[in-house]
Amino acid sequence: MLFVAVLAARTDAQSISAASIANAVLVSESGRSVRLSDLRGKVVFVNFWGSWCTPCLLEMASIRKLQATLGGRSDVAFVFVSARPQELQKDGSWLREHGVAGQNYRTEGGNPGLSVPTTFILDRNGAVAQFRNTAVDWEMHADFVRNLLPAGSARS
């Protein structure tokens, strides 16, 4: 039965269209709404996670290393989405305490039903360039992210 539930979760995550991800309304810890489509022109790393999720926490070290490898580029945005909206403040605190850059949000409509960790990397046009539904060593994907960026683009 557990296998069926995990398989169903993977299928649901894979069936999410690029348009639904780009147009998803996210709400920040301060209550400000944003759409991922507002970040067009940037490569957007979107990680659905939770501070209660052991695989999520294990991959955070590699996300922090990926951020360091990219050197704080202004054309890359790291967006974290709490899988449990009621954990938004706790998750945001965890990111700050552990030096992970980026904003933490919840989805406007509540839990999107994704298993965690789930990550989407959107290219500068908002298309899904990479999808992962498992913990990943993101430092190993730095070249993939760099290749989505324009040559000679500015750093912040």
Image (spheres, rainbow, N blue to C red):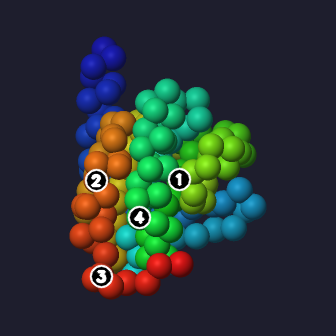
**Label whose residue precedes the other's in the sequence (1 or 2):** 1
- Foreground tag (4 vs 3): 4
- Looking at the picture, tell me which residue is in the foreground, 118 or 150: 150
**Three-letter code for the amino acid on which mark 4 is drawn:** Leu
Q: Residues within 10 Å of mark 3 (few under 14, many from 20)?
A: few
Q: Does 98 sit above or below residue 9?
A: below
Residue at coordinates 61% horizontally, 54% vertically from top-left?
A: 104
Report the Cα–Cα distance between label 4 and label 3.
13 Å
| Residue at mark 1 | 80
| Residue at mark 2 | 141
**Label whose residue precedes the other's in the sequence (2 or 4):** 4
Q: Does 43 sit above or below residue 115?
A: below
Name which quarter of the figure residue 12 lies in: top left
- Looking at the picture, tell me which residue is in the foreground, 103 or 38: 103
Q: Quick check: can you spot residue 40?
A: no
Residue at coordinates 48% horizontally, 41% vertically from top-left?
A: 61
